[in-house]
Amino acid sequence: MVSLDKSEIQWNITKAGTKTANEGTEYTTTKEETTVYDFVPSKSGEYMFSSKDGGTGKVYSSDWKEIEGCLYDGAAEFGMKVSLEQGKTYHLGIALSDKEAKWKIEPVKESSDYTYRVLSDNTVEILKYSGVESNVTVPDKIDNKVVKSVGYGAFAENENIVGVTIPAQVTDLQYGVFASCANLETVTFKEGSKLQKIAARAFENCSKLHSVSLPDSVQTIEENGFAHCKNLGPVDLGNGLKNIENNAFYYSGVTKVRIPGSTTEIGASTFYECRSLNDITLGSGLKGIESGVFYHCSNLKQIELPDNITYISDNAFGGSGLTSVEIPDSVTSIGNLAFYGCQSLKKAVIGNNLAYIANNAFGSCALTEIMWGDKVEKIGTESFSNNKNLTTVSLPNSITEIEYGAFNGCENLSDIEIPDSVEAIGGFAFDNEGSGIRDTNTKWYDAQADGDVYAGKVYYKYKGEAPADTTVTIKDGTKGIAGYAFYMQGNVTEVVIPNSVNNIGEVAFMGCESLKTVTIPESVKVIGREALGYLSSKQYEQGYKVEGFTIRGVAGSAAEKYAKENGFTFEAMKPDYIKGDSDSDGKVTISDVRTTLRYVCQKVELDEEQKLAADVEKDGVINIKDLRKVLRFVCNKIEEL
């Protein structure tokens, strides 16, 4: 019992007073109403305070102590069975989320093996079965009234029941109705069934239930409907099912399932840890695969994904037994860990509309073959890490970025083709040298000589320990410096970065204690976290920066922004080019307008310095806006670029 202050009760009697409720009379309460109803039982016993229209019902004693005994309390209905004493006064109230609710309080009725109540439409809801039969047929009628609903936990934890038959006119099996019936083996729905849903936890933990065949009338299986039914075999979901909610078959023994075309959603973790599942057909109505749906379905070797799904969520197939997967072109996103730990997965076909492969999406699999879609732009953190059977990777020209650890731990990966389109690579993408985690490198990395290592157009790493007073000159045409590229290279004293570099990865120069000054060209647009001037992470309060560290660069550039944000000295320098002089003749004329126009129309190529000159708007792209501004300057419409 819980004591409550009247001011905490939504139906505060100080606002609207009280009314009297009579047994079996139906009342209507509106959302705005604050009336409390007083009820005096005519006899002692169990009463049902209930509504089928929504709201939350509460019963209080005369001194405002809440009476326990709530059977179900939800948005669609509530039913509260309470023991009341004859002659005492009780307070009844309803809090509403909708406009109104019809409710009543009445004595619980009994007939033979059943406790029940009569609903507002003069049909019966069974509240409790007290019989001892092993094979139970729910009656069509009780006291000449049609049985339409089997209530909350009505058969729950009954160890006598082996089989149950549900009559056709039952439309509602409520929360936990057969939960934990340890010996229940079969459930039969009579022909012409009107059942609309399997309520939450309806058959949860029925450990001997071995097969299910749902009628076509069922539209929803609510959460945990058949969870922990460890001996559940093949399941027939009927042809009218629309939604399967979260955890519906969680940790069950289901072996075979056909999802009908009417189903649009399979909730998260629906078949989570269903290790006996070996045959599933997905219907064409599905919009996507939710998180954890097939997690650790270790006997699921094959699956055909419908060609209209648009997403595969986090851990959807993690640890499953898939041997190959083909992601359809309709898929535009896959989540983190989507196929992580699929230790039999040898082949992955990436769809043609997938731009980003999420973190650890295919980590720790057994991949030997990857077929890339033509729109993949970014490979996420550790996406393909620890695929120890992978020997060859040929990346498509669409890829621009490879994130941290993407292929680390792929110890047999010896042949890597990285296109010139790749501009940024995260740390330890192909090795673990210096990571402090493990020393497993790809064969490709092990084959590289000590010193400068390039991966396509990206300076990947300085391999080995740099000699004392080392100067590193990064070659022209390099587009990026990878994350952790010079990590803990304390002997590097100077780095020459060409105008072609547009990004410097995170922690790229951390621990370079002898590197006191760095000149950053204007071409660099992105400088990653703690990339320059740090000895260790900011998490350490003292001594984590290189003392006196200075950054030189063009005013207004990414270099100046990084210096200011990180508290480093910045020295402004004049650019080596004339703004707008795209033909490099030392002056800005109509010739530069023609040159830039031809570049925009892909008629000529410009070198990196010419591109910097042509980008007069300094927005990182060369387009008609730059042309217009240069033309206005040449025509004396503006005084400076």
Image (tube, rainbow, N blue to C red):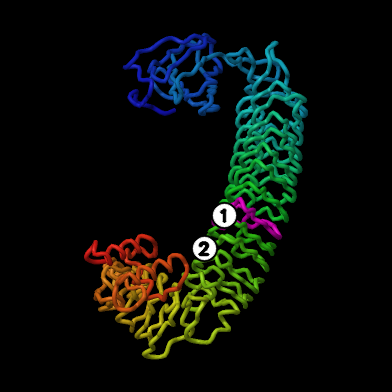
Mark 2 nearby-residue class (10 Å; few <14, some 14–19, many ≥20): many
Of marks 2 and 1, which one's residue comes earlier in the chain?
1
Q: Position of residue 14 (x, y in %)?
A: 32, 17
Quadrant of the drawing holding the N terminus: top left
Residue 309 among those drawn in magenta: no
**Magenta region: which residues?**
316-338
The circle on residue 378 is 2
Asked if residue 472 shows in the view, the reply is yes
Q: Which of 480/13 is in front?
A: 480
Residue at 74% across / 37% down in the picture? 212
Q: Which residue is mark 1?
A: 334
Q: Secondary structure at mark 1?
A: strand
Q: Which of 379/121 is in front?
A: 379
Mark 1 nearby-residue class (10 Å; few <14, some 14–19, many ≥20): many
Residue at 62% across / 37% down in the picture? 243
| Dot 1 amino acid type | Ile
Q: CA distance from mark 2 to mark 1?
A: 12 Å
Asked whether, in this view, residue 328 is left or right of residue 516, the answer is right
Q: Position of residue 511 (x, y in %)?
A: 37, 78
Residue at 53% across / 24% down in the picture? 78
Residue 327 among those drawn in magenta: yes
In the picture, residue 147 is in which quadrant? top right
Asked if residue 551 shows in the view, the reply is no
* Vertical order, 157 against 366 (above or below): above
Asked whether, in this view, residue 544 is left or right of residue 603, the answer is left
Q: Secondary structure at mark 2?
A: strand
* Vertical order, 455 against 625 (above or below): below
Quadrant of the drawing holding the C terminus: bottom left
Q: Position of residue 515 (x, y in %)?
A: 33, 82
* Vertical order, 87 against 375 (above or below): above
* Main SS of residues in magenta: loop
